[in-house]
Amino acid sequence: MEVRVVASLVAKPEYLEEVAATLHEIIEPSRLEVGCIQYELHQDNEDPACFVFFERWRSQEALDKHSNSEHFGRFASQLEGKLASLDIKTLKQIA
């Protein structure tokens, strides 16, 4: 069953540019993963420190492989201490 993810991240003001660059780095390797259907990054129109990923994965297994990938681990470590908040929701479409 397809799994969708909405991940909201807010950068600490002093790390905004660094966080933005790190977020862009994860996109292409994630899109190349088997099971990735959609991997998009968005930025809030009113708060440039707020970023939102919309992701679609073919299965929970594909998402788990993504979460355990080398590039995702590097991504997570690069963001350590640089975010004011992080909220990740894993969703299933119901209508």
Image (cartoon, rainbow, N blue to C red):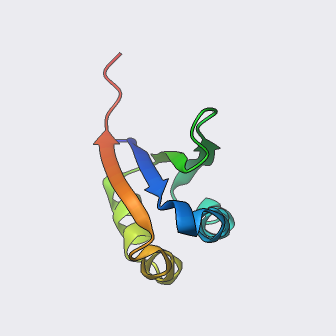
Q: How many marks?
A: 0
Quadrant assignment for the N terminus:
top left
Tell me the residue at 32%/54% (across/down): 60
Residue 30 screen position, x and y as percent: 58, 64
Residue at 59% of width from left, 62% of height from top?
Answer: 16
> Could you say where residue 78 lies in the image, as x and y percent from the top left?
50, 80
Kindly give the residue lying farthest to the top in the view shown: 95
On screen, residue 83 above or below 48: below
Q: Is residue 63 visible?
A: yes
Which percent across, then down, holds residue 39? 58, 50
Comparing 23 with 12, the one in front is 12
Instruction: Please say if 34 is above or below 5.
Output: below
Taking the spot 56% from the left edge, 69% from the top edge, the residue there is 15
The quadrant holding residue 4 is top left
Provide residue 83's location: percent of width, then percent of height.
Answer: 42, 64
Horizontally, residue 94 falls left or right of residue 12, namely left
> Residue at point 45% right, 70% down?
82
Q: Is residue 34 visible?
A: no
62 vs 50, nearest the viewer:
50
**Residue 92 drawn above or below residue 84:** above
Q: Quadrant of the C terminus?
A: top left
